[in-house]
Amino acid sequence: MRVIRHPEVPQELEAAALWYDERQPGLGGDFLGEYQATLSRILNEPERWRTIRGDNRKLNFHRFPYAIVYSVQADALYVKAVMHLHRRPFYWKDRD
């Protein structure tokens, strides 16, 4: 299954990784690794994770207060956001 990311997702990842690296060197890399691990879990079972707001789904990271918000569309997984769990919920709701 191919992965399509909303254009703002790379910026969200970079901002969060930089924030963590400023707190502790190397923690930003850990954050990006957790993103990859969470994305792999989604790709293994895309329909498994809970739905939110229509056909959108999310899966929380294990170690960080973030989640990947995504939808499954035909042969693709569309990543809509890398959302902080305690700030501005549903800011991504208008992303197609």
Image (cartoon, rainbow, N blue to C red):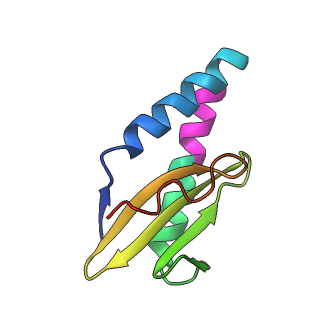
Seen in the picture, residue 18 relative to 44 is either above or below; the reply is: above
Q: Is residue 77 magenta?
A: no
Q: Is residue 13 left or right of residue 79?
A: right
Above or below, 27 against 75 in this view is: above
**Magenta span:** 25-34
Residue at point 53% right, 58% down? Answer: 68
Residue for point 40% across, 60% down: 79
The answer to whether residue 26 of the structure is visible from this angle is no
Q: Which quadrant holds residue 30?
A: top right
25 relative position to 2: left or right? right
| Residue 30 falls inside the magenta stretch | yes
* Quarter of the figure that contains the C terminus: bottom left
In the visual, does 77 lie left or right of 29?
left
- Image quadrant holding the N terminus, namely bottom left
* Image location (x, y in percent) of residue 35: 54, 48
> For the point 37% across and 77% down, which residue is it?
72
The front one of 40 and 10 is 10
Residue 73 image point, x, y percent:
30, 78
Front-most of residues 59 and 84: 84
Residue 43: x percent and y percent?
A: 44, 70
Q: Is residue 79 above or below residue 75?
A: above
Question: Hey, which quadrant is residue 2 in on the image?
Answer: bottom left
On the picture, is 1 further left or further right than 32?
A: left
Q: Nearer the viewer, residue 89 or 69?
A: 89
Q: Determine the main secondary structure of the stretch shown in magenta.
A: helix
Q: Position of residue 16 (x, y in %)?
A: 57, 33
Q: Is the residue 56 above or below the residue 68 in the image?
A: below
Question: Which residue does the image show at 57% across and 83% down from the upper left?
Answer: 48
User: Would residue 27 be visible to someone looking at this image?
Assistant: yes
